[in-house]
Image (spheres, rainbow, N blue to C red):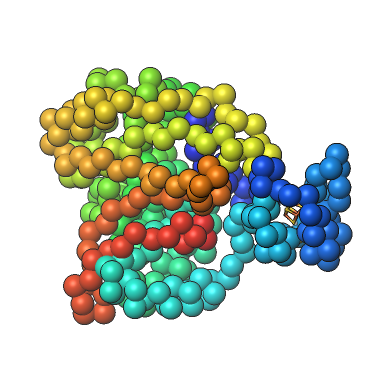
Amino acid sequence: MRCTWCDTPESHRMEPELAFREDRCVRCFECFDDCKLGAISETDGRPVVDQGVCRWCGDCADGCSTDARLQIGSVMTESRVLAELACDEARFRETGGGVTFSGGEPLLQFDFLLRLLEGCRALGIHTAVDTCGAAAAHIVERVAKLADLVLFDLKHVDDEAHRQLTGSSNRELLENLRLLSRLGAAVRVRFPLLPGLNDDAAHVRRLGSMVSSLGFSDVDVVPYRAVDASVYEALGRRYPSGAIGEPSAEAIADAVRVMAECGLRATVVRREDPGVDDEGHREDGPYVCRPLSHPPRPLRGTDAQHHQPSAKQDQR
Ligand code: SF4
Ligand code: SF4
């Protein structure tokens, strides 16, 4: 599935990659020496990485004093992820928290995901899986049994409209949503509100009625946040032609009202503002934070509440 308005280009590839922010590069060329493989050379006065040679070790990013070079994603073993999460357990207990597996699409690495969910359960850490639901039914069923919460993104209920928006049919994911209903899984449907694409009242009502008829009580309305062109540029990708504007406060309120009329508790969930430093740079670089909401789950006999996971946790 590839949405025409995608706001997370850093999740497009399964392997790690390097981002380059030209405006931050001071042309010191110290990264040449940092790369033991000799993958970086000067082209037109810029440090350019030969993607055929680079093995994503991240040394050049670590050594860049201006953060012009950033490593996006990293290869991690299950034991390393769980060891890091175990270190955070006290913070989860203190602040009320857990882990959200997001992406991109976490079900693309479902074997890894299932092992991590099992590991978190053994550690007593609350888990949520943020998915579009496009996976084989047996995978969704196993995830539903291991995750404490499924955040299910639903963009359009009409199959043809869904194909136009994402390039894929919605039949499989709607089947999986019905499956989650039959399984009695804890699900929050997340509805990205896209101006001019899915925000007309008739469609919102159709979607809300369908979600309500499946026995789910909560829906998150997620107002679209305009794509930051600099994130695409840093990754050397073309800015999407399908980029759209942000919904008005009135459109958001209308969607919430219609969902409520469908018998749903609707919550507006906004992506976090990444923040901008004194020079106007995004403080989190190409990383994107997503706000999440979860019901509490006792942690090892406590009544700890769930917490907001970090952007880095979401990247893993
Ligand atoms: S990417 Fe960083 S280390 Fe390399 S030339 Fe630019 S500022 Fe220097
Ligand atoms: S990530 Fe590693 S291999 Fe790739 S260019 Fe940087 S230092 Fe070289």
Seen at 53% across and 42% down, the residue is: 280
Q: Nearer the viewer, residue 297 or 222?
A: 222
Q: How far across and how far down the image is residue 174, in percent?
A: 35, 38
Q: How far across and how far down the image is residue 310, in percent?
A: 42, 60
Q: Is residue 221 above or below residue 121?
A: above
Q: Is residue 313 above or below residue 181?
A: below
- Residue 80 is drawn in which quadrant? bottom right
- Residue 129 is drawn in which quadrant? bottom left
Q: How far across and how far down the image is residue 141, in percent?
A: 37, 56
Q: Nearer the viewer, residue 63 or 312?
A: 63
- Residue 86 is drawn in which quadrant? bottom left
Seen at 31% across and 62% down, the residue is: 307
Left or right placement of residue 258 versus residue 284 in this view: left
Mark yes or no: residue 168 visible.
Answer: no
Seen at 86% across and 59% down, the residue is: 38
Q: Nearer the viewer, residue 235 or 63?
A: 63
Left or right placement of residue 315 versus residue 213 in this view: right
Seen at 20% across and 33% down, the residue is: 256
